[in-house]
Structure formats: C-alpha cells, structure tokens
Image: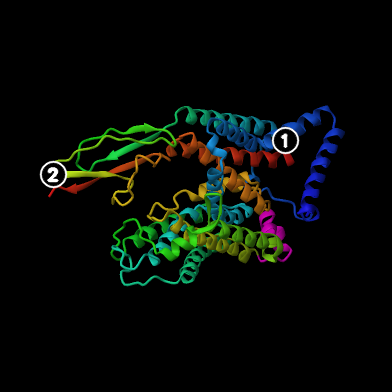
Amino acid sequence: MEKKTEKTPKTGGLYSKINMSVKSANVMVASLLALLVIALIFVVKHNGFTVKFETDGGSYIAPVRAEYSDKLSPEVPTKEGWNFTGWYTDRDCTESWDSESDTVQGSMTLYAGWDKVE
Amino acid sequence: MSTTALKKRNRFSAWIDDFKAKSGADKRRAITDLLFNNAMYIIIAIAVIYIAIRVPAFLKLPSIVNIISLTAAKLPIALGIGGAIVLTGTDISAGRCVGLTACIAASLLQMTGYANKIFPNLKVMPLWVVLLAVIAVGAVIGFVNGFFVAKFKLHPFIVTLSTQLIVFGLVLMYLMMGGNNGQTLSGLDASYTNFVRGTLFKIGDVAIPKYVLYSIILTALMWVIWNKTKFGKNMFAVGSNEEAANVSGVNVFWTIVLVFVLAGAMYGITGFIEGARIASCSANTGLNYESDAIAACVIGGVSFVGGTGKISGIVIGVFLLQIIFVGLNFLSVDANMLYVIKGLIILVACAIDMRKYLARK
C-alpha cells in the first residue's frame, strides 16, 4: 500500500487548491468545534417536543410541550352532533393513541376521532 | 482477526515509540494532531456519557438494539455514497433515489383489495422481482450520474443535483398515477413487511429485525468489492490520482460509471428496505438521507482527498451518527433542531478532514 501511494502521489482531490497553513486550519477547526459544542448545549437547554391536537372542526385544544417518554392526558374535545372516539396518531384514524401505555417519542400531531351521533 | 489486532497494537506501540523519540516541539505537535484528528470522536464520547448519566435508559438493551437497527437501515446508502467520495465526488441524488425506489417497491407490494392502489388490478408481485426492479431503477439513475461525471468531466455535485430534481419530479408523478392521487402509500402486503421487518432473533424481549442481516450481507459484499476485486483497486487508483491511473492502464471512464451504478443499486436496496421499514411512503421519503450518509462517511475517514477510505470506517461513522441522533432524541431535542446539528457535524467533519490533509502535506 505504501509503495503504491509513493508511485502515484495523491492530487489532493477536493482540497488540491486549498492554500492554508496548518495553524490557520487549527483555528478554523477549533472555532467550528466550539460552535458545534455551543449548538449542542443550546439544543439540549431548549429541549422539549411539541404535541399538537387536530380536532377536525371540534373545540380547540392548545398544543402542549412534552419530554421523551412522557405520557399524555389531553382534554376531551367536543363537536356538535359527533361523539369523540379517542385520539389517533394518523389522519385516517387507524392507529389509536393509548394514554395509559403510549409515550411521546418526538414532536407529533394527534388527530381526534369522531362518530356521528345517530 | 488476531492479525488485525496485532497490527493495531503494533501501530499503537509504533506511535508511542515514535512519540518518545520526538523532541519537545514535535511532541506538542503530535499531541495537537491527535486531539484535532479525533476531536469528533471525543465530542461524541462526551455526549454519550452525558446522555447516559441523564437518561440511563439510553444504554439499556432496547435502546442499543434500536441504534443498531437504525445503523443497519442507513448503512447501505452510506456504502454507496462512500464510493463516490473515494473518487473525490459526492452524490446528492441518493436520498431522492431512495424515495423513488421505496415508492416503487411499496406500490408493487400493496395488499390486494387495498383502496387507492396505484395499480388496482395488480396481484402482489414476488418479492425478488420487485427487489431486482428497484435495484435496476437505482442502477439506471446511477448510470446517468456516472456517465455525465465520467464523459463530460462535470463535477458530481452538479450532475447529482440535477438528477436529484429529476428523480423528485418522477416520484411526484409516480405517486399521482392510478387511484393513488399523490397520497401516502400504505397497506403493504404481509410478505413484504415480514421479509424486511420480521424478527431475525430475539435478545430477551427485544426483537432484532431481519434487515439487520441484509445490511451485514451488503457490508460484507462491499468489503469484498472494495478490497478484493480489480474494480475496487481501480476505484482507489482513480480516486487518488486520475491521470496516473489512466497512464497505468486503468479504464477511468468505466470505473467512474461503475462506482455510481453500484451506488445506485445500493440506493435501490435501501429503498426496498426503507419502504417496508417505515411502512408509509410519500414524496418526502428519503429526504436528506444523503446528508446523513455523507456525514457518516467523512466521520468514518472516507476522505474528500480521494483514494482514502475503509468499509469499517463507514460502518463506524453511521453508527456514531445514529448514537448522537438517538441520544438527542432521548434528551427530547426536537427534530427541527437536529438539522442544525447535522449541518454543523458535516462542516466540522470536513474541516477536520481538510486539516488532516494539510498536516500531512
């Protein structure tokens, strides 16, 4: 492997035209690293997921902030002429949200399921 | 295995001996090099320790299995892009290509009788036919990329930017076909979801999905291609010095084309797996997958200098990125903010990569 690289010197690829001393590269890398660390600290300090509630014409339920593995106990919405059947994680209301066992894994929207009053 | 361990130990002790022999100023420089070159790993290690202390569940079995599964899911696309980076290029059409192939796989494997099918009269196709079809679609896109890069010497960034848009247009048009009308594709046939998401085996109560096995097979296959075939050696030769490779008789045109075709085939396989893994494919499927893959490759030591990179590095890179993303999710960091972090990680990883090149020069 060593021999081969000797025979065919690398052209430098994407960096072939860069003309910078190692010292200034150090400064650049160090400041970018500092930026990354600051950003990481910022996002961890400002954590929290947003859970929105879509009631499809029913009463408004305000979004709530939640943390990972929190359980949710949202208010029961009302809609005239309809009975509330529960919260669902999809718009088609096929995957129901069980407030006893399901936990928050990320920001999401819950959709209210409705049954028409006979 | 033992020989690699021995080689590693030798390398380590060689570094120590080398270090001892150095004078004061050289010693300081060797330490700066060590710190800068491994800065990303150090930051990730500190983050993992911090997260594990704050949320002990992070290092419990279910979470580790989750990280390994996510790594397996994101690995094939990174293995494909790795080749393009070895050629000092990149491929930003990868994510959309995964989206297209995922939508094709899902549409051909919807349950019979499911409403809004793209092909209402289509029976469920055999899995291998669909798998070959999506590999072919990926390979064709890869061929287009490779052809324009190799023939017209266009920068891969420009070529793949245009194919990215073209492929996205194709996804949108494809989703409008039949009775689907642009909606999310779901209602997949059980044979498909079982083949991808079924349980491989269980550790305690935690199931390992089958696609982890497929990912391991693909990794082994790529390792053989990169290290044991003539094509692999040609790829590294073209990556480190195209003109020198040409002089020594390497067919540069076909090497470049094949690297992109191989990458495209990998995106096809990723799409096939992804379709069943997320189980609801839309035009958004695959969005920004290439950025994760490029970041993983650069963190794993596949350098934009060209002709440098290892399969093991790519695996480690994907794994480290997934650790960070899963960990930040445990800390309840919103997905919106993760994009900023991802962008910074790519920037830092490339800066470190560039610094390594300058220091060696």
Q: Can residue B113 be seen here?
A: yes
Q: Secondary structure at mark 2?
A: loop
Are discs 2 and 1 both within one chain?
no
Q: Closest to the observer: A99 or B47?
A: A99
Please state the horizontal and vertical placement of residue B145, each as a whole percent of the image. Answer: 52, 60
Image position of B147 (left or right of B26): left
Q: Quadrant of residue A73?
A: top left
Residue denoted by label 2: A81
Image position of A78 (left or right of B271): left
Residue denoted by label 1: B34
Question: Disc 2 marks which amino acid?
Answer: Gly
Height in image: B50 above or below B7? above
Please state the horizontal and vertical placement of residue B286, each as a whole percent of the image. Answer: 45, 52
* Callout 1: chain: B
* Callout 2: chain: A
Question: In the picture, which quadrant includes the C terminus of chain B?
Answer: top right
Image position of B55 (left or right of A117): right
Circle 2 residues within 10 Å: few <14, some 14–19, many ≥20: few
Please state the horizontal and vertical placement of residue A10, each as a whole percent of the image. Answer: 71, 51
Question: Disc 1 marks which amino acid?
Answer: Leu
Q: Can residue B163 be seen here?
A: no
Residues rendered magenta in the picture: B235-251
